[in-house]
Amino acid sequence: MQSLPVIGGVDRAVHDLYRFWVAPEAANDPDITVLLYDDAVARETGKTTPIDRALLANALREVELAGARAVGIDMIFIQPSDDESVLIDRLKQMQIPVYMAYADPESDRAAYWDGSVADDASEYQIDFWKRIGNPKVQRVSPAIGVDETGIARRWPSLKPGGKPTLAAALGASEKQSTNYAGAIAFSRLTAAETEIGLQIATDMFPTLPIDVVSDPDLAEFSRPLLKDRLVLIGADTFNSDQLSTPVTRYTDQTTIAGVAVHAHMLRQVLDRNFPPPPPWWAILVLALVLAFAAAATATIERRPVTLLLIIFVQTVALGLLPIILHYAGYDILYLPIFGLLSAWLTVFLIVGYAVRSRTSTERAFARGALGKFLPENVALEILEKPEKLKLEGEERPLFMLFTDLEGFTRFSHARPPQETARILNRYLEEMSQVILDHAGTIDKFVGDAIVAFWGAPLKEEKDGRNSVACALALHKTAERLRAELTVGEEKLGRTRIGLHFGQATVGNFGGERRIQYTAMGDDMNIAARLEGANKYLCTDILVSEAVREQAPEHSYRPMGAICLSGVATALRVFEPVDDDRNAYTSDLTDAMIEIETRNSGAGQHLRDLAAKHPEDMAIGALIDRIDQLTLEKPYELGGK
């Protein structure tokens, strides 16, 4: 019955709600610690894919020195890097067990790397493991049981004789390494631990940034959280695996990092908590009992109040059944809760109709009553145009904006969760309102970052002007919030903004149970990289030349040409300015024209401006790269 799309989807949603209800509350875990390579670490090292392997090597050294029992690494190594030898040397020296994710070339690789580079990735991974040559370092499967809706509910089904899961290997559970496919036993952080009553799905596992652990000067502070523990290391960046779970669907977290799911699985292994499903014959007997109860109820000739009371009692009994089975030691993952309810309702309606139908009028009335189970407009739309249910998108020219709050992860680590939540909510609320006030479409929030665009779902002539005006207004709002939300001596980081105009595919994307109106494409990536380029150009806002051409109403300062990672051609970039900083924009423009046309004495005008305005760090940054400002010789940001 769960194979039916509608019933199966609702069954999973109902199952998730029950899993949330029965998920035990847990305080800080005494056995497991998680080390994260998060966005703050990626920005600090300038490396995301591949990660900074020297940093990982240093962290492994400190974890071993701290006396950890074993280490699990939820990262696969399928492409070369300039610091790979440092990590390999460290792995060769490890004396404690290390279990590293390995994408099986036969069964796993399609899930972990692009098919176009499969052969190269597979060859490199094999060579990488050959170079380690340490029996203490073992391969494990990184698999998690994620269904078609993108929700991690169950343990993965592994092929016979394959590598054990990361959690099974760390927890030394040979019995459950490959043959358990039941539900993952998620827990919730005890409400008292959250201090603000938020239901949180990960913080019961002590979590540390990997760069803190890898630094010998700071490592001593983290050693109490590493000694005699099982340590999981994984990524929690914007482009890493972020998974929804039965618990996060009904908590204040939408998703958690894949390594956090492995942590829950490891806790389950340590507890040897592998409940069996209810026997198939028991479910069959239950279905027959429900069918009999539904038929008996439909034939009762009682007052409506009495009939409703009987139905209510049966509904409550069915609703309590999964909870009873759970506490009786059974896994309710594959219990067709909604299917059983649908069967009860179907039998009730059919029998009731057969008993009471005497005339054609009564039959018509019954059909009308059945039709009330679906909204009329929805039902008619689906029946007349079933293609409306398809997920699809269209290509459109968009103005794409990305923002990021610099250093917020580190900022949040220094204060209680409730204060972090208050600050972030205030920041996102006011920044979002600015975007909406400028007729923008908010795509998504990624932590403290915001993605928005103009040009969809409705296209307006003022989209270009509105998008640039919004970027300027966002900067002003962010600077005001920096002053208002400053706590103690630590100030909120500056907000970097990137804006680009180009083609993107926009529409509804997702799965059968969850969709999102969003945009995607190469030009979206350019906008994201422009946001990151602010860090190196000492600017707050960067827009592409395409934006300047589409929105000539604004004033812009030329910031030279740059070459972004993953972009084949160099781009001229500009910083939009308002009246406060427009006084010498024309002088800066003239100076940049001199450099591009290679006039005699080119560059001196720019140096004079820098000397005259020493507070303008963006002009100072132009001086630092004065020989890399043209399209012929751009400033390379490929590795940054």
Image (tube, rainbow, N blue to C red):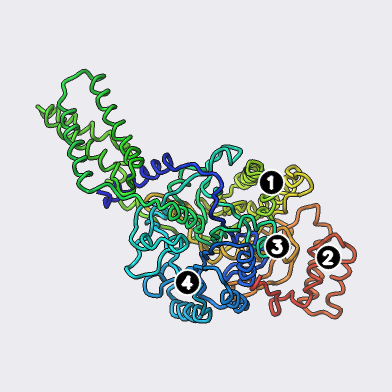
Mark 4 surroundings: few (<14), some (14-19) or many (≥20) residues within 10 A: some
- Hey, what amino acid is under mark 1? Arg
171 vs 438: above or below: below
Q: Name the residue under label 3.
A: 534
Instruction: Give the residue type that dot 4 points to.
Output: Gln
* Residue 435 shows in this picture: yes
The x and y percentages for residue 254 are: 50, 48
Front residue (pair 351, 146): 146
The answer to whether marks 2 and 3 mark residues whose Cβ atoms lie closer than 8 Å is no
In three-dimensional space, the C-alpha distance between marks 1 and 3, rounded to whole angstroms, equals 27 Å
Residue corresponding to mark 2: 587
Quick check: 615 left or right of 476?
Answer: right
Disc with the residue nearer the chain's start (4 vs 3): 4
Q: Where is residue 357 in the image (x, y as percent from the top left)?
A: 12, 28
Using the image, determine if residue 185 lies above or below residue 355.
Answer: below
Residue 307 falls in image quadrant: top left
Query: Which numbered mark, 1 or 4, is in the foreground of this view?
Result: 4
Mark 4 sits on what residue?
Answer: 138
Q: Which is in the foreground here, disc 1 or disc 2?
A: 1
- Marks 4 and 3, how far apart at CA: 41 Å
Which of the two labelled residues, at mark 1 and mark 3, occupies the earlier sequence position? 1
Q: Nearer the viewer, residue 102 or 436?
A: 102
Cα separation between marks 2 and 3: 22 Å
Helix, strand or loop under label 4: strand
Q: Name the residue under label 1.
A: 415
Instruction: State the residue at coordinates (46%, 52%).
Output: 244
